[in-house]
Image (cartoon, helix red, strand yellow):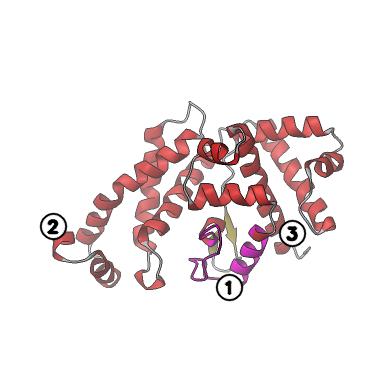
Amino acid sequence: MGDNLLEEKSEDELWRIFKKTRDPGIRDVFVNQYAPLVKYVAGKIAVNMPHNVEFDDLVGFGVFGLFDAIKKFDPDKHVKFKTYAVTRIRGAIYDELRSIDWVPRSVRQKSREVEDAMRHLESFLGRSASDKELAGAMGVSVKEFEKTMQKISGTSILSLNDVWYTGEDNDKASIADSIESPHSLNPETIVEKEEIRRVIVKTIDELPDKEKKVLVLYYYEDLTLKEIGKILGVTESRISQLHTKAIMRLRAKLTNIKKGIM
C-alpha cells in the first residue's frame, strides 16, 4: 500500500482494515502520521525534567509507546487514537526513565516513607490527611515535611501512568485512562475492569480540590506545571508538590484497596 493511503481512505477505514489484516504498510502510515505526537508529548515531559535528561532520548522512549498504541488500539472502543496514544507514549517514556533509575536512593527512601504514612493515616482517618497530620505521623515538623516534599517533587517522575495490576494475566490499567474532563470521568474508559475503574474514579474524586485540579489540568488539558501555576496563582514548585502528593495519595489508596484494608 502506498503513502497516499490517507488520501484514498479515511483514517477510520484504515484502522478497521489494520485491525483485520495487520498490514505493515498501514502501520507505517500511522507511524508517520503520529510521529509529531511523540515529539509533542516528549516536549511536555522534558519541561519538568532535570537538564541531564535529553529530549532526543525521551522521543526515542516515546516511539516505543507509539508502536505499542498502534498495535493495541481498538477502533470499536469509541476512543480517539490520539487520546489513547498520548497515554501510551507518556507511559513508555516514564517506564524507561524509571528503568534508568536516576533518582537518588535517599529520595526514593523518603518517597516510600511519605507514601507509607499516607497509606496508614488516610486508611485510619477515612479521608485525605493534611501536611500537619502527615508530619506528625512521620515524627517531623511541618517545615521538615515540606522540605522532604520539595526534594521528592524536585526529582520525582511519579505519574498517573503508573499502572494498577489486576493480578489476572498481567492485565493492567493506567490511572490516567480514567480521567476524561474537569466535570466528568469517561464511562467508556480504556480500562477493562469495571471494579478497578470504579475505584480509581472514586479515589480521584476524593482528592483535595487543588490536587484534583492539578491532575485534570496536567493530564486532560495537557498543560505544563508552570502553566498550571499561573492559572492557580502559585509557584511551579508548589504545583509540582501538589502533583506528587496527588499521585502518592492515589497509589496509597489503591495499595490499601488491593491489600483489603479499605
Q: Which mark is residue 194?
A: 1
Above or below, comparing residue 113 to residue 8 in the picture: above
Horizontal side of 173 relative to 58 (left or right) equals right
Q: Reply yes or no: does residue 162 show up in magenta.
A: no
Q: Which mark is residue 157?
A: none
| Visible residue check, residue 103 | no
The residue located at (66%, 35%) in the rendering is 152
| Visible residue check, residue 242 | yes
State the extent of the magenta-drawn residues as a range.
178-204
Element type at mark 2: loop
x and y, in percent, of residue 139 in the image: 87, 37
The residue located at (42%, 30%) in the rendering is 54
Label 1 environment density (alpha carbons within 10 Å; few <14, some 14–19, many ≥20)? few
Residue where numbered disc 3 is placed: 256
Q: Which amino acid, mark 3?
A: Asn
Q: Which amino acid, mark 1?
A: Glu
Residue where numbered disc 2 is placed: 4
Residue at the limit of the structure toward the top, as seen here: 51
- Distance CA(mark 1)–CA(mark 3): 18 Å
